[in-house]
Amino acid sequence: MKNTTAQFVSIVSKIKMQHIQIAVMVMVALMLALGAGAPTDGGGIGH
Amino acid sequence: MILGVAVFAGLLLGLLLDRLGRRIWQPPVFRHSWLVAIFFLPQFLAFYLPATRGLFSAQLVAASLVLSQFGLLAFCLFNWRLTGIPVLTVGLFLNLIVILANGGMMPVSPETVSRLVSSETMARLEIGERLGTTKSILLTEEMMVFPWLADRFVPPDWIPYRFAFSVGDVFIGLGAFVLLAFPTRKEFAIKKGNPSYDNQPDIQAANNGGKRRC
């Protein structure tokens, strides 16, 4: 349990603010592209 | 999915150029990014979330798509100066025009759909109906308004992932790719090691997160 907690703390401490900013920015860009586009996905037809 | 590929391909290229020392990659700073989260939500519920997308009527799907795209258009106008956004906005505008003109959904012709699905699936489809859980409606070319803006292009047969896309989608994919591949503003583009870098305290400050070195 202590090891798991220590590992978790170690991983979290390596996450920098810049990583969070990049993740948020990528999410925004992804939502923007998916929302703006309207390709017809062959896999979605017939469902 | 194909637009998601454009986003991640742009991100990978941007990070790769940064790693190779060609330019400094900085994530684009969006203004009013909450607009995207709010206005993508109707589409997420209507098209992407399996638990809810079957609950939407055709009218509600069309309203969700149009409302969502108007909100995203507003976001693009707020962020017009970011690299790639003008190109993406053109694509969004073209898609929105053809969607509005055809009752709130993206038209696609039976000829195009026949290149995406099997003949058995094709036989079950009816003209004027929404195609499964997609944003598209099956219309003949004669029934479409602005047919040249509809989903009419299909990738080559050797690509196993089958989809149809519009001119607007091409602009959106290109804009999203450029947005993430080359997000750095010009003043950040001079990197350490360049002879002119030492004479540019403002660029140094920008590269150091806005803090000037004294």
Image (spheres, helix red, strand yellow):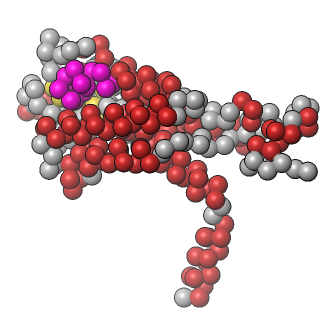
Residue furthest out toward the bottom: A2
Looking at the image, residue B146 sits to the left or right of residue A24; the answer is left
Tag count:
0
Q: Position of residue B204 (x, y in %)?
A: 83, 42
Can you tell which quarter of the image residue B152 is in? top left
Looking at the image, residue B202 sits to the left or right of residue B41; the answer is right
Residue B127 in view: yes
Can you tell which quarter of the image residue B202 is in? top right
Q: Residue at x 83, y 48 (%)?
A: B212
| A2 shown above or below B199 | below
Looking at the image, residue B189 sits to the left or right of residue A25; the answer is right
In this picture, which residue range is highlighted in magenta? B95-108
Q: Position of residue B150 (x, y in %)?
A: 28, 20
Looking at the image, residue B141 sits to the left or right of residue B91; the answer is left
Can you tell which quarter of the image residue B119 is in? top left
Q: Residue at x 20, y 35 (%)?
A: B62
Q: Residue at x 64, y 59 (%)?
A: A17
Q: Residue at x 79, y 50 (%)?
A: B211
Q: Is residue B200 magenta?
A: no
Q: Position of residue B193 (x, y in %)?
A: 88, 38
Image quadrant occupied by the N terminus of chain B: top left
Q: Is residue B101 magenta?
A: yes
Q: Position of residue B113 (x, y in %)?
A: 21, 25
Residue B20 in view: no
| B170 shown above or below B8 | above
| A5 shown above or below B53 | below
